[in-house]
Amino acid sequence: LPMWTLVWHEGMIGRMHHSLVLLIALFLQLAVAPTESIARDERRELAVPADDSWRRPDLVLEALAVQPGETVVDLGAGSGYYVGPLATLVGRRGTVYATDIDESSLRGLEGLKATHGFSQMVIIRGAHQSSGLPPNSVNAVLLSHTLRELKHPVQFLYNLKQALKRNARIVIVDYHRTDDGFYPPKQRRIELSEAKRVIHRAGYRITASKEIPRQYLLICEPN
């Protein structure tokens, strides 16, 4: 079994420095995480990097600043790339909501939960206009390569506010809109300036931004 499926004693987690937990989560994540699912016809035309360390999951997890016992959601969780590290960070007393609208992704998430015994993982069927999350339930939100897939991103983010606890963090990661030969193609990406416009129109402020290879990372909070 992958190492990160082992149950960590919560007392140990509490005593460990948060940055060390992030480094451990990163190491274990890179060791076992599946690559992003890609349609077969697109795979033939666009390159898929064999080494996905360029995604810098360490920076994404650091931006989320998830603590043991908190509730975090991966909106558009897909194959569950971040679910393992997030489940490790929140511990058995926390909760990881994993949402998606794709049937195959939902089945894959169910399999991931069953295989690795993630009792803290709750799978939710999402929608383009609503997250489906309980009100006032979430400390941190991750939208990794998800914003571009939303049909109504402003309305979705606006409706998301009701699920947020006080001082909740929202981290948005997406690809720069460039033609770099990698999936997804340029026309399916959302420009950084457009992402910022959507965020502001939905009633959020951007508290920090980072440039990472091929991607941008935005940390937001509601106004």
Image (tube, helix red, strand yellow):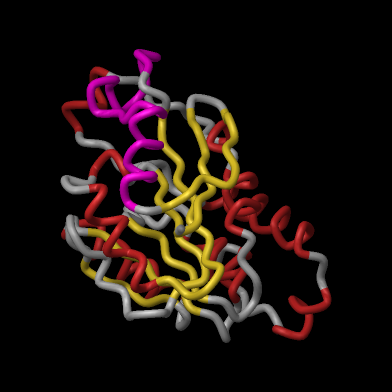
- Residue 130 image-quadrant placement: bottom left
Relative placement, left or right, of 215 versus 155 is right
Quadrant of image for the N terminus: bottom right
Q: Give the image location of residue 13, x and y in percent.
A: 74, 76
The part of the chain drawn in magenta is 178-202
Examine the rendered structure and indicate whether residue 46 appears above or below residue 189.
above
Q: Percent x, y for residue 153?
A: 25, 47
Examine the rendered structure and indicate whether residue 60 appears above or below residue 71.
Answer: above
Q: Is residue 140 left or right of residue 184?
A: right
**Residue 117, visible in the rendered structure:** no
Depth check, front residue: 44 or 126: 126
Residue sitting at x 52%, y 66% = 168
Residue at 24% of width from left, 64% of height from top? 106
Residue 45, placed above or below residue 218: above
What is the tally of numbered marks visible in this picture? 0
Q: Residue at x 16, y 60 (%)?
A: 103
**Quarter location, residue 147:** top left
* Residue 174 locus on image (x, y percent): 41, 36
Q: Is residue 84 magenta?
A: no
Horizontal arrangement in the rendering, residue 41 relative to residue 123 (left or right) = left
Instruction: From the top left corner, tell me how far across and down residue 142 is, in percent.
Output: 45, 55
Q: Is residue 44 visible?
A: yes
Q: Residue at x 52, y 39 (%)?
A: 217
Q: Is residue 202 above or below residue 131?
A: above
